[in-house]
Image (cartoon, helix red, strand yellow):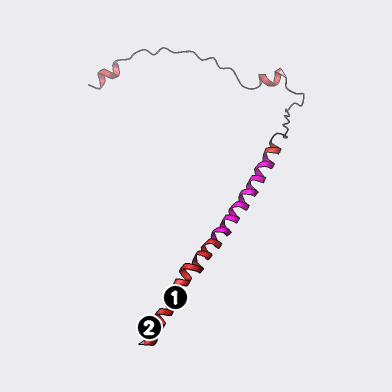
Amino acid sequence: MLKVLAIFILIYLIVRLFAVVIFPRLVKWYVRRIQRQFYNAQSRNNEHRQSQKQSRGSSKVRITYKNGAGKSSAASDKVGEYVDYEEIKKEEDTSWKNSKK
């Protein structure tokens, strides 16, 4: 009986030691590790954004035309065909109203 009681007390002390001392340290170590990973990812992301901002203003656009002579009025005339639309007045047809009755 005394042996069983001693085993229970020993188990209680080990669990208490783990809960009070070891577990909080493990949690703190894990949280710090995750924080470091997060901050490293953030710093890499910020460096990438800064390099994109620097390269954004330095880009050049070159426009080449099929005829090679530059933009001319002939090129702008070939954009499309002009279509003249006429407004059609809609006459009120009441024959369909009478046919539904």
Q: Position of residue 98 (x, y in %)?
A: 25, 18
Q: Position of residue 72 (x, y in %)?
A: 72, 19
The quadrant of the picture occupied by the C terminus is top left
- Taking the spot 67% from the left edge, 40% from the top edge, the residue there is 52
Q: Against 24, is 97 above or below? A: above
Front residue of 51 and 31: 31
The residue type indicated by label 1 comes to Leu
| 13 vs 4: above or below | above
The residue that disc 2 covers is 5
Please say whether residue 45 is one of the residues in the magenta stretch: yes
Chief secondary structure of the magenta portion: helix
In the rendered structure, the answer to whether residue 28 lies left or right of residue 13 reads right
Give the magenta part as a residue range.
Answer: 30-52
Q: Is residue 46 magenta?
A: yes
The label on residue 13 is: 1
Quadrant for residue 93, please give it.
Answer: top left
Report the residue that reaches farthest toward the right. Answer: 69
Q: CA distance from mark 1 to mark 2?
A: 12 Å
Where is residue 70? Give x, y as percent.
75, 23
